[in-house]
Image (spheres, helix red, strand yellow):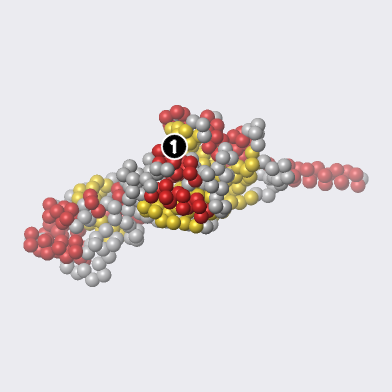
Amino acid sequence: MQTKKIYVRDLRDADSKIDLQMELVAGKDGLGKEIIVGDINRPGLGLAGFFDFFAYDRIQIFGLGETAFMRRLSVEQKREVFEKFFSFDVLCCVFTHNEHPDEMFVEFANRYRVPTLVTRHRTTRFISLLTHVVEEFFSPMVVMHGTLVDVFGIGVLLMGKSGVGKSETALELIERGHRLVADDMVEVKKIDESLLMGSGSDIIRHHMEIRGLGIINVRDIFGIRSIRNRKRIEMVVLLEEWTDGGEYDRLGIDEKRYTILDLDVPFIIVPVRPGRNIPIIIETASLNQRLKKMGVFSARELDSRIQNWMRMEGERSDD
Amino acid sequence: MIEREVMVRSDAGVHARPAMMFVREAMKYPCEVFLVKDNVEANGKSIMSVLGLAITSGSRLIVRARGEEEESAVVKLVSLIENDFKN
């Protein structure tokens, strides 16, 4: 398992469904600080002069109470408190309710390189949103070398040795109206201990390398409907060079599983050889997976039909 | 498995061309090759994967190889990075 380092910058640029509505007002130079614990601290006690157990390495949240308190302080008092406050290596400060810090605070934050942000959210609301965002940041992550495509609403992770045709298969799936999430490098996060979310690296998002063509931008070529940013991984397909002696699943009665970050995902191995239409096999596998999710299991149903028929035949011949 | 740490010093970082140089070199070896930045492991034989690391000048990388000829692969690839991707 890998853990990506999280910086204050990531908080500001969080690419999530949740909009923290934050704006940087001071301490730009400190955006590269690493967030080590995702917890928050209300600095009220510190502002009142009590700095024992001051959790300076957490995200400091200034609510209406803190800002009102600071307004009551005289210039000298404020300077004294800030001197003390910023003498710690404070991670970052967030002011809620769209309350902007005063000039002196901004000056201190810039000097000590403490990123200071202002959000429009109310304090409680902000804390709960922030918890979601930070939890996602700190959720277990692994980078898989594969291609993630949304096929009929099922997130299919194509895996296999390089050169087996993952990108080409994905390209044909896209051409057939399915959507690319990420090629070659898929960041997989385990969310709420129950689902695996896959996405691509920001910088190369929706680009693919096709041997013979070079790098292409899928979004530009195929349009907005051919892409999506993230998708839950619900099936893993391993593309494998066809070997004549290989034992491939002929029934599909038993479900194989592929384990990613301790979670099991349905898994199929598809042998590849020239002339075999892999995209249509993957489309069918996705549809079959959707049926299974609804409780319809083709292979098992056929098997029980055959067994029923055989039993009835047996009873008839007993007569 | 063998790995070595290396720092990128070329001013422009690892953009398309240096990434291609790296991948082209990595492809010459039968072993698996990985490039690691900030604990994120990229497939050293895939251009997109290497580009996805967003390697800037001053980045610390680990070149990792596993399998046949892993040692010569790491030595060669580290020297490629140290020589600013000039062969």
At 52% from the left edge and 57% from the top edge, which residue is drawn? B1
- Tell me where residue B70 appears, x and y as whole percent: 52, 53
Q: Chain of mark 1?
A: A
- Graded by Cα atoms within 10 Å as few (under 14), some (14 to 19) or many (20 or more), the crowding at tag 1 reads many
Task: Tell me how many marks there are.
Answer: 1
- Tell me where residue A1 appears, x and y as whole percent: 48, 57
At 47% from the left edge and 56% from the top edge, which residue is drawn? B3
Which residue is label 1 attached to?
Answer: A206
- Tell me where residue A107 appears, x and y as whole percent: 14, 53
User: Which residue reaches farthest right?
Assistant: A319
Question: In the rendered image, which quarter is residue A64 located in?
Answer: bottom left
Q: Amino acid at mark 1?
A: His
Whether residue A128 is situated above or below residue A164 in the rendered picture: below
Which quadrant, please, contains the C terminus of chain A? Answer: top right
Residue A301 relative to residue B54: left or right: right
Residue A232 relative to residue A276: left or right: left
Residue A276 relative to residue B74: left or right: right
At 61% from the left edge and 51% from the top edge, which residue is drawn? A257
User: Which residue reaches farthest front?
Assistant: B87
Residue A309 relative to residue A292: left or right: right
The reply to whether residue A190 is in sight is no
Q: Nearer the viewer, residue B47 or A216?
A: B47
Question: In the rendered image, which quarter is residue A165 located in?
Answer: top right
Under tag 1, what secondary structure? loop
User: Which residue reaches farthest bottom?
Assistant: A52
The reply to whether residue A43 is in sight is yes
Q: Nearer the viewer, residue B79 or B4?
A: B79
At 55% from the left edge and 42% from the top edge, which residue is drawn? A162
- Tell me where residue A292 appears, x and y as whole percent: 62, 44
